[in-house]
Amino acid sequence: MALAALASAVRRSDHRAIAFAHLDEPPLHISFVSDEAKQGFCAQLGEGEGAPVCLPPATLGLAHGGAVTHLPDYDRGTWWVQDVAASLPVRLFGEYKGKTMVDLCAAPGGKTAQLLSSGAQVIAVDKSPRRLTLLKDNLARLRLHAEVVCTDARVFTLQKKADAVLVDAPCSATGILRRHPDVAWQRTEVDIARLTTVQQQLIDHAATLLKPGGELVYAVCSLAEQEGEAQVRDFLATHPDFQRTPLTPQELGGQALYVSAAGDVRTLPCNMTERGGMDGFYAARIVRT
């Protein structure tokens, strides 16, 4: 797979920086069910070598090489593993406490946990029974509850339209090569063509689940423009009853670097390297008008 060709959403000047970022072992990022849980976790780890690094927004990074089950409060279920970039798409939604949210392609459940811990009523949808088992186990440990549905997200239906839908679509995963280097050897142009078709079907179907005024967030852990920016551009061109709602740096804790000119999220593996780096992600917020 020609990574430089796929990473068309990335400036050529960033290609070298991304390559060097892939040489470093990625840290472990974790999110918390509450600020109190985060403070308690930090107090148990203390300071010095191995101390957690605060990341925007509200995430901790650990230079951790052992089992996560040995970390503080694992059995208490106060945190879950989630790269800081993967936590950003959920933050594109407005106030969602008490609202009905659909998380399509939800497993293994990090974004579902984010929504639930902030008070949303969540329907988590995924077609993989094995991955849904991971989601259920994660939610059980966190003492969170979601309605879990095992089906293809492209045919999932609702009796009542949702307030918001999250589509974390399957993709080439070129944004997470430092965690999964095998992707560089396994993905082909044929795979990309197949995945972009699935992504288009997912975002089109997600639109049918939303009530007027509802929010749709589309996200992929890919650096390829055809899987991110182009998908949203094509969707808006064929759905006149939807429009992009650009986000502001303030919504991401003042991190202007992660906001594209169009007002979407675009993170790169070479971002935040002084604190261990992050995954490459794209996300856009769209509203049914």
Image: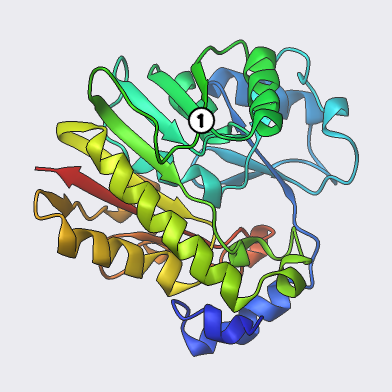
Asked whether residue 188 is in view, the answer is: yes
Instruction: Name the residue located 25 percent from the left edge and 66 percent from the top edge.
Output: 234
Instruction: Please tell me in which quadrant of the rendered image residue 115 appears.
Output: top left
Does 29 sit above or below residue 180? above
Amino acid on which disc 1 is placed = Thr
Quarter of the picture containing the C terminus is: top left
**Which residue does the image show at 42% across and 73% down from the upper left?**
225
Q: Report the residue marked by disc 1.
A: 151
In this rendering, the count of numbered labels is 1
Mark 1: secondary structure: loop
The quarter of the picture where the N terminus appears is bottom right
Label 1, residues with CA under 10 Å away: few <14, some 14-19, many ≥20: some
Question: Camera-side residue: 215 or 128?
Answer: 128
Judge left or right: residue 167 versus residue 59. Answer: left
Residue drawn at x 45%, y 55% as measured from the top left = 198
130 left or right of 49 in image: left
Residue 37 position in % (x across, y down): 62, 20
Q: Nearer the viewer, residue 255 or 169?
A: 169
Q: Position of residue 199 (x, y in %)?
A: 42, 56
Q: Is residue 162 left or right of residue 87?
A: left
Which coloring applies here? rainbow
Q: Measured from the top left, where is residue 133 in percent x and y?
A: 69, 24
The quadrant in which residue 154 appears is: top left
